Image (spheres, helix red, strand yellow):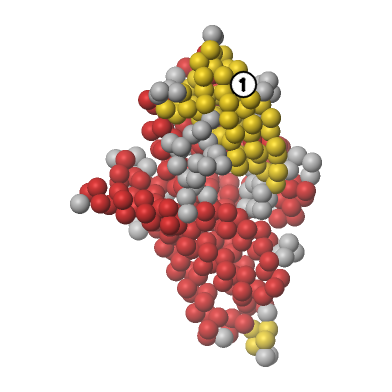
Amino acid sequence: MDFDLTTEQNLLRDNLRSLLLRNYRFEDRAAAIRSASGWRPEIWRQFSKLGLLGAALPERIGGSGGGAVETMIIMEEFGRALVIEPFMESMVCVAGLLARVGSELADRLAAEIIAGESLAAFAWSEPSSRYGFSRVATTATPAKGGWYLNGVKSMVVGAPWASVLLVSATIKGSGPALFIVDKQVDGLRTFDYPTIDGRYAADLHLDNVFLAGRGLIADAELALPLMERLGDDAVAAQSSEAVGLLRRMHQDTTDYTRQRSQFGQTLSSFQVIQHRLVDMYLQIEIAESASHLATLSLEDADTARAMAVSAAKFSTAGACRFVGQNAVQLHGGIGMTEELPLGSYFKRATVIESEFGSIDYHLARHARLERTLA
């Protein structure tokens, strides 16, 4: 695939890579995860000052007017550096969705997120929802002057750090809708916990949470199409992140096999090891091509977009499994320890493999959509 970046996009990539090389050493990341907050707010402020938070969002809400390619560039560099700050959760998911709503309230909230004044998380997943956005057991009941929300949301990544939440809830007789919920609202309980890949998530319990009428961001007619589009945006972004971290795992493994000796020779001198490294490289190339295609297809018709995104998901998820497992095997037991960065990259790759839909889910989705074109 011939994919050339513009001068501005190359500058974005180079500046971001330079920033992360200076300020995102693996030791600093590990220390941040062990800290009381679990992340580095000062890094988030740097991202905001450099315009990274709004790089892919419209100018009318304070963004730079970029698009999916800018998100791809940022996410690949974040994957390479194993960034834990919730860029995808807050910017791609919440701010990106709010930008598509287009209302005055949604634009104002998105502008606050871009400016770094608010941090947001998207609460859509529930214990029984699996990967579908339409299965929403949380309810929104109309009341005088607003709404009452009741239900449970699970595995909301970034919620422990968020100040506002975008919550899906079903309006009886209509369907899923989207609401903005302040983190400090009465009736909301959060249960925070670390995830295996160094991030933090929370389960949310909403018990008669009252929202004023302006808390409704998208009604039942608009919400589900927005969430389905958001899911494709998120998968495309995460596929780009996967490419970045896979390239780092491959490079670390190549360097290790050139240094490690066995029977008086470096591991890289053995032909079977060379074959493994080439197979890993080919998997990454396939994943990158699929990721690029998904990125470039995000503005296509719904079916074409969804098929390209699902193809990217099962390509990158397969690469995460193959490259991750081979990288660990070629490192030996030390590959799964916290001593080397590889163990953390492997954990993140394992999470990406199933987040926003497993390989089987996206294979089935692709096949279903393909039959509609026959």
Question: According to the image, label 1 marks what residue?
Answer: 208
Q: Give the side of residue 247 with respect to residue 312, left or right.
A: right
Q: Residue at x 67, y 75 (%)?
A: 332
Work out whether residue 272 or residue 176 is closer to the camera in this orientation and state it.
176
Q: Give the side of residue 70 with respect to residue 45, left or right.
A: left
Q: Position of residue 73 (x, y in %)?
A: 49, 48
| Secondary structure category for the residue under label 1 | strand
Q: Is residue 373 visible?
A: yes
Q: Quadrant of residue 285?
A: bottom left
Work out whether residue 14 or residue 149 is closer to the camera in this orientation and state it.
149
Q: Residue at x 66, y 49 (%)?
A: 195
Q: Residue at x 66, y 39 (%)?
A: 202
Q: Position of residue 119 (x, y in %)?
A: 62, 31
The quarter of the image holding the N terminus is bottom left
Q: Residue at x 34, y 52 (%)?
A: 366
Q: Position of residue 42 (x, y in %)?
A: 71, 37
- Give the residue type at disc 1: Asn
